[in-house]
Every structure is written in C-alpha cells, then in structure tokens.
Image (cartoon, rainbow, N blue to C red):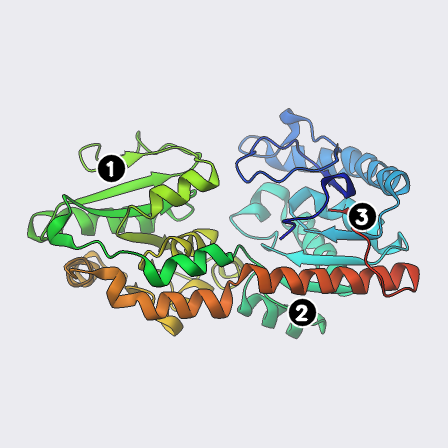
C-alpha cells in the first residue's frame, strides 16, 4: 500500500524489531519500544509476563511513542493495532493532535490469547483497539464481515476493506496464464502458504488426500511455503510433501504459479468466532495472484468460506468428516484443467475485492483527510508515521 512513497518521509514505530525483510518495504527510521524477549508471553508463565508488561513496559512504551511523535512531527499517523502495541497507541495517538488512520487486521482476543494475557487484560486491549477505531479520522478493516461487525458495535464505518492485493501486472497475467493439463503433468501440486493455525483441520485434509492418492489421475504433491517447518509432525509424509521455506515475494509468486491448486483452511467449528468470522488469510490473495484455484475448507460462517462461495474460485466445503471431504477432493482434483474451470471466478474475485491500486488510492485519500484534520489544509505531504 505504500508503494512509491518516498522512503525518507516514512517512519515506523513498533514493539518488536523487524526480522522479515522479504516484502522489501524500507523506512527512513524504525523506532522500537522493545519488549524484552524473556517477557514475551508465548508458553510459560504467560499471565505473570503479561502482568509485568502491563505494569512496567506499557508506560515506558507510551512515553517512547510520545517522544517519537514529537521528534518526527508527522502529518499523518497510520495505526495498525496489534497485541501489545494497542495499549501505547490508544494512550498516545488520539490525544496527539495529529489526524490518524486505523487499519484493523485481527482482533486481539483470538487464538487463545485470553488465556495468555488474562481475560480481563485481553478485554481491555480489545476495548482500547475499538477506542482507536472510533477516534480515528478514517478507518478500514480486513474483511467485509469485520467491517460490518465494527460498524454494528462501535457505530464507526470503514472506508474500505484493506488487504494484500493484485497489481496491474498480475491482472495482465491472469487472462493469459497458460493452463496446466493434468495428463501432461507428473503430479497434482497443491500449495500451502503461511503458518498452519488450524492443525486439526489440516490433518483431516491430509488424511483425505492420503486415501485418494491411488485413485487420482496423477499423484498428489503438497508444497509448503512459510517460516515454520512441519517435517516432525505425525501427519507429514516426506514422500509427497515438500517444504520450501519462507521465500521472498517474487520467488514465492513464481513457485506458486507452478502449482495446480492452493489450500486455504479455517476452523471447522465456531469455537474462535472472533478470528473465524472476521479475519481473512492473506494466502487466499496469494493464490488468486498466482492464478490458482483454491480448496477452501472451513466453517460456513467464516469470512473465508463466504468469499469463496460467492465467487466460485475452486472447491469450497465445510465437510466435517474425512469420508465426505475425500469424495469432494476426488471430484475436484480429477478436473483436467482446474484453472480453466475457475478462471472466471478467480479474475472476478481479484478485480472486485483485491485490486491493490484501487485500495491504494483509497488509502491515500484517507491520509489526505487526516492531514486536513491536522493542519486544516486539504493537502497531503508524504510524511507518515506508520
């Protein structure tokens, strides 16, 4: 979304150092109110660590953010509330006198974080995130259901859905993408990009694939792209699964375009509705960019399944038992030219929902409104603290 923005006019404040450079976004300076590594509440004594962060680190981080804003004197602040950054952001940004834009990605009370952070603390963080959203000059969110939920709960409306998107070169590629024909390929290649968040659903998918291997026109290969290794999992089969690691974006796109399908799962139950119903996995857009038909597996009320059903971009199912899933996969993976079967839906979904340039223009318009609130002048100079 910041493509083409002058690097010397772009500054970033966060709670953790940046270790993932694969997206290639540069900034003039990165200000970091570092969370001590031993206090990050991952697995052990998480509630005690959370209490210590809340009591001691949060005020220091708020002071650090205030000092950063005074030093930079930005025209616009772009806020992306995430976990521990939420407290300092909510304490400082709304009273900074600077117009700010909020992009709501994931809610904080998901993935069992209430257990890690403490239910009361997690609830306060969620309320702080909502406060930021309401107080913002302009705002957007990560999915249509999230936009509707925020509007209903807070009364504040989002300008647009903001997510990863396709660039012009990607839209030029899709209509002329050559079709892979199963009979001329040594294997049916299914891609999985990112971290596995619902491993029980993933294991069910693997089990269904395993049982139809010998019945398909070509053997199945499952290709993993991401920072985590799953080679030690009980369901991992080295004979037909391959890990590629966390590739830079251009290389990832090249590898994905050599696959036949993409796999995008969500939870099959609704035990974590704040994630399942409102968040939206970026892998779905990566598959669209690559021209991959998508195997979508998840609860029927999830944001992902709703999108996949609306546009018919591949197999979309909420099957909860392996037998039903096996039958559906058998039918889908037997299609000789899967991209041709779903080309129309893939292109329509990409154009209507994930046009990066259109979204970028909307974001820049939001920044201009933030500048007007700050300066009283409807003029945008590219000096943004993100």
Decide which of tag 2 and tag 1 comes sooner along the chain: 2
Residue at the spot of label 3 = 383
Alpha carbon distance from label 3 to label 2: 21 Å
Q: Position of residue 176 (x, y in %)?
A: 33, 60
Image check: 267 left or right of 128?
A: left
The foreground one among 262 and 86 is: 262
The foreground one among 300 and 17 is: 17
Decide which of tag 3 and tag 2 comes sooner along the chain: 2
The foreground one among 377 and 119 is: 377
Check residue 19 in the rendering and tell me which mark sits there, or answer none: none
Decide which of tag 1 and tag 3 comes sooner along the chain: 1
Please identify the quarter of the rendering in which residue 94 is found.
bottom right
Residue at the spot of label 1 = 241
Q: Is residue 244 above or below residue 148?
A: above
The foreground one among 360 and 16 is: 360
Q: Closer to us: mark 3 or mark 2? A: 3
Residue at the spot of label 2 = 159
């Amino acid at each position: 979304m910041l493509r083409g923005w002058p690097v010397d006019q772009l500054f970033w404040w966060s709670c953790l150092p940046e270790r993932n450079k694969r997206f290639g976004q540069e900034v003039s300076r990165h200000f970091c109110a570092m969370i001590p590594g031993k206090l990050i509440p991952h697995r052990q004594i998480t509630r005690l660590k959370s209490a210590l962060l809340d009591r001691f680190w949060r005020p220091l981080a708020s002071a650090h953010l205030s000092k950063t804003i005074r030093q930079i004197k930005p025209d616009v602040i772009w806020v992306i509330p995430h976990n521990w950054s939420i407290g300092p952001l909510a304490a400082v940004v709304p009273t900074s006198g600077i117009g700010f834009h909020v992009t709501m990605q994931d809610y904080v009370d998901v993935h069992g974080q209430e257990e890690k952070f403490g239910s009361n603390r997690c609830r306060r963080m969620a309320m702080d995130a909502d406060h930021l959203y309401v107080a913002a000059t302009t705002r957007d969110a990560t999915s249509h259901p999230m936009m509707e939920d925020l509007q209903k709960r807070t009364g504040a409306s989002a300008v647009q859905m903001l997510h990863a998107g396709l660039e012009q070169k990607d839209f030029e590629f899709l209509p002329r993408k050559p079709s892979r024909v199963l009979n001329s390929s040594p294997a049916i290649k299914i891609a999985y990009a990112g971290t596995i968040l619902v491993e029980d659903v993933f294991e069910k998918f693997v089990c269904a694939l395993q049982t139809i291997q010998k019945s398909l026109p070509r053997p199945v290969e499952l290709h993993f792209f991401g920072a985590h290794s799953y080679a030690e999992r009980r369901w991992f089969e080295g004979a037909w699964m391959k890990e590629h690691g966390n590739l830079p974006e251009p290389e990832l796109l090249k590898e994905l375009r050599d696959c036949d399908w993409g796999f995008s799962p969500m939870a099959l139950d609704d035990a974590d509705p704040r994630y399942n119903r409102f968040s939206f996995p970026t892998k779905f857009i990566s598959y669209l960019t690559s021209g991959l038909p998508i195997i979508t597996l998840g609860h029927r009320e999830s944001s992902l399944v709703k999108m996949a059903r609306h546009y018919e971009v591949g197999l979309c199912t909420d099957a909860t038992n392996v037998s039903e899933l096996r039958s559906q996969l058998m039918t889908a993976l037997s299609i000789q030219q899967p991209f041709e079967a779903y080309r129309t839906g893939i292109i329509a979904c990409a154009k209507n929902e994930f046009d990066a340039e259109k979204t970028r223009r909307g974001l820049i318009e939001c920044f201009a409104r933030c500048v007007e609130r700050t300066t009283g002048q409807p003029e945008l100079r590219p000096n943004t603290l993100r």
